[in-house]
Image: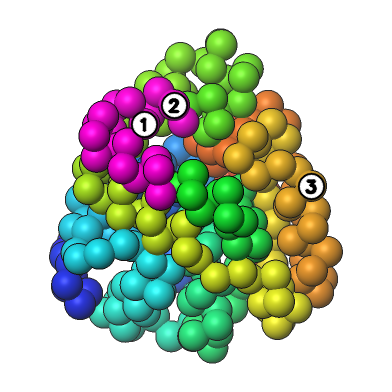
């Protein structure tokens, strides 16, 4: 389905029936990232799977894809689908987006799953790195970026022995354009620091990530969980930044049990 949000058409899919769960995929992927895991949830929940702007089938619009724009997009999706309150799952940039969304629309959230993400802003080196990467993507193309990123997205054991998962990850990445990827890098570079926001989260929260996540080390997940009152922490073995894609049955089970307790 397609809806208009400010300057961009956004694509989303809806699966299953039940209480609403909105699932926000990582960069540089699309909604299909969630499909292996979603099959473990859709018999109990209505899953809303958008493509974030500039990724998948969603248009990029003008300028950097800031977390403000993404939060406005998310609110538009909720309003269009008449979602009053929902559980939200955010992986990587999906987590960055949820922090901004929480600051603006916290009354919409009944539970949060923060997956392979972090609360801190980029330091100067990180900002410069993302800006440089944005330019290189435009010059060298998305395939160059995918090759550069893959070792940081998947666990070493996945890359060496699970070629089907590697192929699935690349297939999801390939739905995104160079312009969309560059805009997202620029938006992530200037995202706000959300460390202080952790202490303001007052709904049930699950922090989850892969033990071999090179992009978001376990120490970052532990720090985030400590900052949120009552948060649960789950580290998934044999998984990296794309834990939900690498271990969909395990992640699906953990998330399903959490949502059964907190998302209804």
Mark 2 and 1 residues: CB-CB less than 8 Å, in contact? Answer: yes
User: Horizontally, is 34 left or right of 254 in the view?
Assistant: left
Find the distance from the CA under tag 3 to the CA under tag 2.
Answer: 23 Å
First-in-chain label (3 vs 2): 2
Density class for disc 1 (Cα within 10 Å; few <14, some 14-19, many ≥20) is: some
Check the image and report above or below for 96 versus 91: below
Residue 178 placement, left or right of 200: left
Q: Residue at the location (18% across, 58% down)?
A: 59
Q: Secondary structure at mark 3?
A: helix
What numbered label is drawn on residue 145? 1
**Res 49 → quadrant:** bottom left
Q: Does 34 sit above or below residue 109?
A: above
Q: Which residue extends farthest top?
A: 161
Q: CA distance from mark 1 to mark 3?
A: 26 Å
**x, y percentage for residue 159?**
53, 17
The residue labelled by disc 3 is 219
Label 2's element? helix
Residue under the point 22% across and 74% down: 5
Reply above or below: 105 against 191: below
């Amino acid at each position: 389905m397609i809806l208009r949000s400010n300057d961009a058409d956004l694509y989303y899919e809806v699966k299953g029936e039940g209480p609403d769960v909105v699932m926000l995929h990582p960069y540089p992927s699309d909604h299909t990232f969630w499909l292996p895991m979603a099959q473990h949830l859709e018999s109990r929940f209505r899953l809303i799977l958008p493509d974030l702007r500039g990724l998948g089938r969603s248009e990029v619009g003008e300028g950097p894809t800031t977390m403000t724009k993404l939060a406005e997009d998310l609110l538009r999706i909720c309003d269009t689908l008449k979602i009053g309150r929902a559980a939200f799952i955010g992986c990587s940039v999906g987590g960055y987006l949820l922090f901004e969304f929480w600051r603006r629309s916290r009354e919409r959230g009944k539970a949060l799953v923060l997956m392979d993400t972090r609360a801190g802003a980029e330091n100067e080196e990180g900002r410069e790195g993302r800006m440089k990467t944005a330019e290189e993507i435009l010059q060298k193309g998305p395939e160059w970026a995918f090759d550069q990123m893959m070792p940081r997205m998947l666990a070493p054991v996945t890359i060496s022995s699970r070629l089907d998962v590697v192929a699935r990850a690349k297939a999801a990445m390939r739905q995104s354009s160079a312009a969309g990827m560059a805009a997202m890098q620029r938006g992530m570079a200037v995202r706000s620091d959300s460390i202080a926001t952790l202490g303001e989260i007052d709904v049930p929260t699950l922090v989850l990530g892969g033990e071999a996540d090179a992009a978001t080390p376990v120490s970052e997940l532990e720090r985030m969980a400590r900052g949120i009152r009552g948060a649960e922490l789950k580290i998934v073995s044999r998984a990296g930044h794309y834990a939900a894609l690498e271990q969909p049955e395990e992640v699906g089970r953990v998330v399903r049990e959490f949502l059964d307790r907190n998302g209804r």
